[in-house]
Image (cartoon, rainbow, N blue to C red):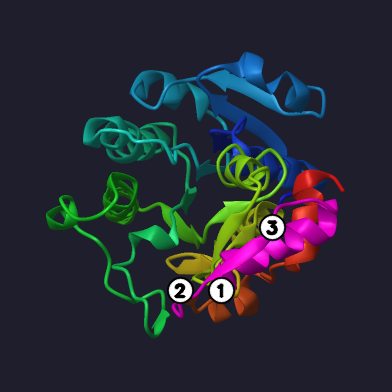
Amino acid sequence: MDLKGTHIAVTGATGFLGSHIALDLLERGATVRGVVRSPKKGSWLKDKGVTFAKADLMDRAALEKAFEGVDAVISNAALFTVQRKSWDDFYQPNKTGTENVYHAARAAGVPRMVQISTIGVYKPKIFGTMKEDSPKLSLKDRRIHWNYAVTKSLSENIAWELADKFEQQLTVIRPGPIYGPRDRNMIPVFERLMRWPIMLAPTFGLPAVHVGDVATAVVNALVNDQSIGKAYNTAGEPVSIRQFMRTWKEVTGAGPPLIPLWIPLKLQVDCSAARRELNFSNRTLRAGIQSALNK
């Protein structure tokens, strides 16, 4: 798809990843319609050229109206929080909301879809590498796994099923833990931790990824028709929490003494398909933290 002159709808465009996707689309010549519950939150994006349509994920009729005349929908809106939430809190937007998005897109005649998923849909694999065909969580895993991860796995399954039923062209993107500018989850946690007088620093490795690099991969999925019908991991090389904290201290020049907590485990994710077909790459940790903190 040549993005110049196209109209692309982005659900959750005022959020963390959604705002970066919207700006990337604008830079490539697309007209961007943010589909959100509260357009007022996007005034700064409106100044940059994003238009808005008001629609809640629970309101299928409003979504259908919001999707009228667009060439593609990036289904990005979902509930993600590190705070404790109930099953229903996650189930309604992540599962039912996804159903509404795909039904509304079909009614509006939208042919192209990109679903934002997560590597959290995989069954945890401390040893070895998680690949796009690795086993995923199911409803029976609800009692022992994070409600967010299980509902996102259900969401992705619904996206595949409905896209196939409605003959929509679908690509799924599965990011790792995302950080970067406008992060309301990961960066605020580290900001609090790095004010402590002394800090335990686990060596457990997480495949953190910069939000801007995920957004680029998402937009590249629209550009490259080869991505249709495929899922892609977009994550970084495992970085220990200790290394994240050390780099934070290097960037800011401040932070507590770090006491290593040795946990010789890491989450390894195969992103070779995204690198090959979506031109995906994850910037260095130092550059990522600098951009997140505007240093």
| Residue 238, percent from left and from top | 56, 74
Residue 257 colored in magenta in the image: yes
| Residue 8, percent from left and from top | 62, 40
**Which amino acid does the dot numbered 1 rest on?**
Pro
Viewer-closest of 148 and 65 = 148
Residue 290 colored in magenta in the image: no
| Residue 69, percent from left and from top | 56, 31
**Distance from Cα at disc 2 to Cα at disc 3:** 23 Å
User: In the current view of this chain or complex, which residue is farthest to the front?
Assistant: 197
* Left or right position of 47 against 53: right
What residue is pinned by disc 2?
A: 267
Q: Vertical placement of 236 versus 107: above or below? A: below
Which residue is located at x 29 percent, y 30 percent? 89
Numbered range of the magenta stretch: 238-266
The quadrant where residue 103 appears: top left
Which residue is located at x 69 percent, y 38 percent? 182
**Distance from Cα at disc 3 to Cα at disc 1:** 20 Å
Label pair 2/1, CB-CB below 8 angstroms: yes
Lower position in the chain sequence, tag 3 or tag 1: 3
What residue is pinned by disc 1?
A: 238
Lower position in the chain sequence, tag 2 or tag 3: 3
The numbered disc on residue 54 is none
**Distance from Cα at disc 2 to Cα at disc 1:** 6 Å
Mark 1, residues whose alpha carbon is within 10 Å: few (<14), some, or many (≥20)? some
The numbered disc on residue 216 is 3
